[in-house]
Image (tube, rainbow, N blue to C red):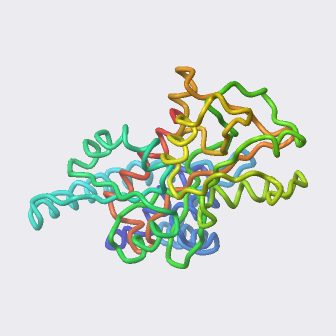
Amino acid sequence: MLKDFTKLHTFLTIVKEKSFSKASAKLGISQPAVTQQIRFIEDYLDTRVLERKKSGVKLTKEGEDLFRIATKLEKAINNSQKELLRIINKEFTFVMGASYSIGNYVIPSYLSDIKEKIENEVHLNVALSGEILDELEAKKIDVALIESPIFREGVVYREWTDDELVVFSNQPLSNVIKKEQFNKFDWIFRDEQSHTQKLVEEAFDDLGLDRDLFKVIGVMQSPTAIKEAVLRASKSSERQTVSIISRHVIENEIADGRLFEARLRKHVISRKFYIAYLKDRKHDAFITNVVDFLLTMRSKI
C-alpha cells in the first residue's frame, strides 16, 4: 500500500475535509470511489480507520495512528517533489488564470503570498471565465479562478468565496432600487458573453423587467471600463448613469465616496467564485499548496 500513496492521500483528504462527499469534490472522483479506497485500506490493515458520524467523520484509534504516519509520508513526498523540480527546472513559473473581476480586483494583492507559499514565480492571466477554462484545458495555466461554474470533463471545481452584484452610480442612490425607477436611468451593461450580464438578465426576468425599455448608453467587456465610464459620467444630467457590477470592483470607490451602491428591491444578485484545476493534477504538490492557501484566505475577501 505504501507504494501507492493515492489511497492514503484520499484518507488524509477525508480527515481534513471531515466528509466523504467534500473529499470526493476536492479529489475530483466519485464518492463510491472514495469509499472503495477506504475499504481497501481497512481490508489491508484488517481494522477500521474511520467512523461516519452525524457530525462528520471520526478517526478510530488505529485511524489516528495511520493519520500520523500518512501525514509524515505526505510531507516527505511534497518536499521530495519540490526538490526534484528544482533539480530538473531549477525554478519554474506557476501560472494562474482569473476572470476579470477576480483577476483585476481580488487576487492581485495575494500573488506575493502565493509566490512565497510555493517558492517560485507566479504569473496571472486575466480573461473571460470561458477563455480561462480553455487555457486550463490546454495546460497553459495551472489553476483557474472563475466567476462561473462552466462545467467541463476532466476539471475539478471547488467553491471559493461569495460575490454580490450591486447597482452603482457616481451620484447618491436610494438603498433599494424599485422596479419603477429602472427606466429613469442611463444604463451601461457588460457584454452578453459575460457571466455577470447573464446573472443580471436573470434578475431582470425574475423581477418582470423588460430591458428593451431601458435607455442603454453602452455595452462593455471589461468591468474596469464600466467603472471608469460611470465615474466620468456627467453629474449635471437629469438622468443618472448606472450599471451593475461585482462589489469587489468598486469597494475602494464606495469607501472613499466616489461611487454609491444600491440593491434591487426584493432581489439579491449573488454568486460563487470557483477554483478550478485539472483532475490529472490533483496530486500535484504545487496545485495543492495554492488551492489550500486560497481556501484559507477566502474569509478575508
Q: In this view, does 74 lie to the left or right of 55?
A: left
- Residue at image position (37%, 67%) is 5
Vertical side of 54 occupied by 146: above or below: below
- Residue at image position (37%, 37%) is 109
- Residue at image position (71%, 50%) is 53
Task: Please state the horizontal and vertical placement of residue 170, each as a whole percent of the image.
Answer: 61, 30
Find the residue positioned furthest to the top. 256
Task: Please state the horizontal and vertical placement of residue 251, each as a whole percent of the image.
Answer: 55, 31
Vertical side of 177 occupied by 104: above or below: below
Q: Is residue 301 left or right of residue 135?
A: right
- In the rendered picture of this protein, how many numbered marks are placed on residues? 0
Task: Please state the horizontal and vertical placement of residue 240, each as a whole percent of the image.
Answer: 70, 35
Q: Nearer the viewer, residue 217 or 55?
A: 217
Task: Please state the horizontal and vertical placement of residue 180, each as a whole percent of the image.
Answer: 90, 41
Q: Nearer the viewer, residue 223 or 85?
A: 223
For the N terminus, the image quarter is bottom left
- Residue at image position (61%, 73%) is 30
Q: In this view, does 14 lie to the left or right of 185?
A: left
Vertical side of 257 occupied by 114: above or below: below
Q: Nearer the viewer, residue 28 or 196?
A: 196
Q: Quadrant of residue 147?
A: bottom right
Q: Which of 82 and 50 is in front in this view?
A: 82
Q: Is residue 102 left or right of residue 108?
A: right
